[in-house]
Amino acid sequence: MSVEDDKKKPKRAPAKKVAAAPSADAAAEKKVKAASPKSSPAKKKASVKGASGDSIQQPVETLRPRREPTHAEIAERAHAYFAERGHQHGFHDQDWHRAERELRSELS
């Protein structure tokens, strides 16, 4: 940097530090804050309709997103039904839909 560059830039004056005398209210407020225990954040609750139509409050943690059964899970269950029937062919659609329906009810 050259001397000319220093002349072009105005220099800032240093900020003045002013120490304010703490008031009695501020001191009391600090004591109250220090003495009070930190509370945990309130758990959110979700409203769910019950069988009778009443609104039921449940913590959000208990509400899980509904998971769909995978293709492999359905195929495995449908094959088990096929084996239960003695490997009798012709009912693959019924086995598949039964497996899908039962897995969905188990996962929900």
Image (spheres, rainbow, N blue to C red):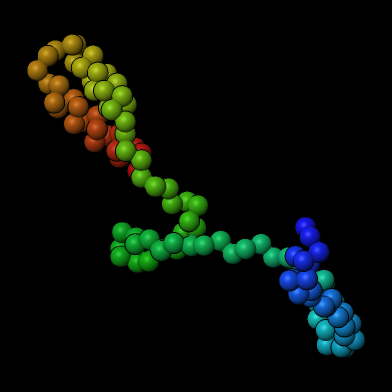
Q: Quadrant of residue 11?
A: bottom right
Q: Quadrant of residue 85?
A: top left
Above or below, 36 relative to 97: below
Please state, as top left, top right, bottom left or bottom right, where the N terminus lies in the image.
Answer: bottom right
Above or below, 82 relative to 98: above
Q: Quadrant of residue 49?
A: bottom left
Q: Is residue 91 left or right of residue 37?
A: left
The answer to whether any part of residue 72 appears in the image is: yes
Q: Which residue corresponds to the image point at 81% horizontal and 64% vertical from the top-left? A: 3
- Give the percent coordinates (x, y) of residue 53: 30, 65
Above or below, 103 relative to 26: above
Please state, as top left, top right, bottom left or bottom right, where the C terminus lies in the image.
Answer: top left
- Give the percent coordinates (x, y) of residue 100: 24, 32
Q: Front-most of 94 and 28?
A: 28
Give the residue at the far top of this rendering: 87
Q: Front-most of 2 and 88?
A: 2
Q: Front-most of 25 and 37?
A: 25
- Give the percent coordinates (x, y) of residue 10: 76, 74
